[in-house]
Image (cartoon, rainbow, N blue to C red):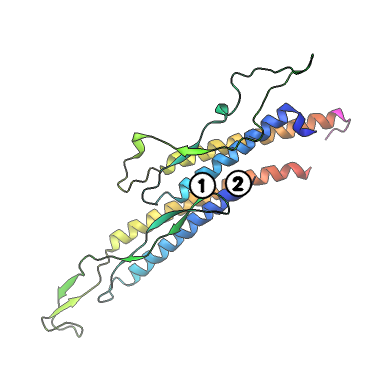
Amino acid sequence: MFDLVNAMKTAASGMRSQGFRLRVVGENLANVDTPGFQRKTVSFESEFNRVTGATDVRLGPIRLDETELRQSYEPGHPLADERGLITYSNVNPLIEIADAREAQRSYQTNVSIFDQARQMNGSVLDLLRR
Amino acid sequence: MFEELNVIRMASSLARHASARHRVIAENVANADTPGYRARDVQGFSTYVNEPFTPRATRAGHVSTPGPTSVRYRSEIVHDQALDASGNGNSVSIERELLKAVESQGQHARAVAIYSTVRDIMRLGLGRVR
């Protein structure tokens, strides 16, 4: 029974991490046209939870994508430098959408595991009802 | 009193095994995107039961089937070459985990059904039809 509660806690840690990942994807996508914006990347780490004895997931450090920023030649633009180049972000919307989909799928799987654990827990409690 | 009944004891260890396995599945799913994480699994319930089912008679006319009562179900890393395909060293397959989750859910439901049936039979013995 405690195993089931721990399963729910672990699934919740997975949901939290995937939710944060989606938040970072949203930030990247929102800043796709911000000049000089560097894309943020999320990493996951597994973490041994001393209280429950389970292997939860937590977020690792958020890093900046060091790939080259996109530049285009627009001499008339007010933000252009002396060579007429303007520096945009290095966000690729296609990659971000794929990342968002993956986060969504993983989140859904965590939700279904959570729901199954909840149902199993409920069936034990139902024994007391009658 | 309930613990003395072997069928109850077996059903409760089956339910505990299902919960333990579900917890490990939740860990796997939560870490589905963690680089370097290796999928784990609990061994099947049959490996924890004394094989073959040898009834042990401690007294004349007394038959019992020994079941695991206080076993700690341990999880271990699954070694499967087919799962090493992903590039970041993670060996979790969401589909496989969902399948295992449904399996353990069914196992748990079976154990609870056995438990409630035995309880109904005992009520019948007490003269109270449910």
Q: Which mark, residue B26? A: 1
User: For the point 79% across and 32% down, which residue is it?
Assistant: B120
Residue extending furthest toward the right: B127
Residue B3 in the image: state x and y as whole percent: 75, 33
Marks 1 & 2 on one chain: no
Residue A58 in magenta stretch:
no
Picture layout, residue B113 above or below residue B31: above
SS state under label 1: helix
Residue that carries the numbered disc 2 in the rendered image: A4
Few, some or many residues within 10 Å of mark 1 (<14, 14–19, 20+): many
The front one of A36 and B89 is B89
The main secondary structure of the magenta stretch is loop
User: For the point 15% across and 84% down, which residue is it?
Assistant: A76
Please report the bounds of the magenta region as a residue range: B125-130
Q: Which mark, residue A103? A: none
Few, some or many residues within 10 Å of mark 2 (<14, 14–19, 20+): many
Give left or right: position of A45 versus A63.
right
User: For the point 57% across and 30% down, which residue is it?
Assistant: B45
Residue A106 in the image: state x and y as whole percent: 44, 52
Q: Chain of mark 1?
A: B
Residue A102 in the image: state x and y as whole percent: 38, 53
CA separation in Å, label 1 and label 2: 9 Å
Q: Chain of mark 2?
A: A
